[in-house]
């Protein structure tokens, strides 16, 4: 991979990593419209869901690695 291609890849990665995802936009919108407590509750639910999916993915990978 030449330096120009690597630079373009790094720039694209930076743009995608810096942009907020739909979860962040929804948390901000809920906070602005319904208050900080509602935004905090939505954020906690989002983090809980991500942790559940992370746990399930780790368990699935451990089963695959064990075979």
Image (cartoon, helix red, strand yellow):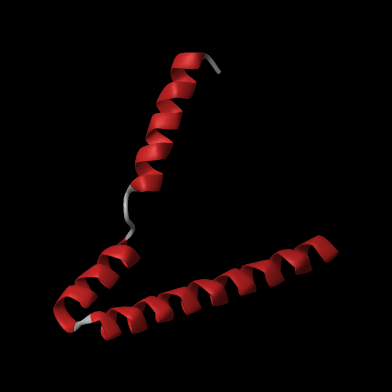
Above or below, 12 against 5 in this view is below
Q: Position of residue 36 (x, y in %)?
A: 25, 80
Q: Which residue lies furthest to the front in this view?
A: 36
**Front-most of 41 and 51?**
41
Q: Which residue is pictured at 55% across the width and 18% down the height?
A: 1
- Left or right of 57 in this view: 63: right
Q: In which quarter of the image is residue 20?
A: bottom left
Q: Position of residue 52 (x, y in %)?
A: 56, 77
Q: Which residue lies furthest to the left in this view?
A: 33
The quadrant the C terminus occupies is: bottom right
Q: Position of residue 37 (x, y in %)?
A: 29, 85
Q: In which quarter of the image is residue 55?
A: bottom right
Q: Which residue is pictured at 77% across the width and 69% down the height?
A: 63
Q: In which quarter of the image is residue 12?
A: top left
Above or below, 37 against 49 in this view is below
- Left or right of 55 in this view: 34: left
Q: Is residue 37 visible?
A: yes
Q: How many marks?
A: 0
**Front-most of 55 and 37?**
37
Q: Can residue 67 be seen in this view?
A: no
Q: Which residue is pictured at 32% across the width and 64% down the height?
A: 24
Q: Position of residue 60 (x, y in %)?
A: 69, 69
Above or below, 16 against 44 in this view is above
- Left or right of 24 in this view: 7: right
Q: Which residue is pictured at 41% across the width and 81% down the height?
A: 45
Q: Residue furthest right?
A: 67
């Amino acid at each position: 991979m030449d330096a120009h291609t690597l630079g373009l890849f790094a720039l694209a990665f930076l743009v995608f990593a810096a942009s907020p995802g739909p979860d962040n936009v929804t948390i901000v919108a809920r906070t602005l419209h319904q208050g900080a407590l509602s935004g905090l509750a939505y954020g906690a639910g989002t983090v809980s869901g991500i942790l559940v999916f992370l746990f399930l993915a780790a368990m699935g990978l451990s089963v695959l690695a064990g075979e």
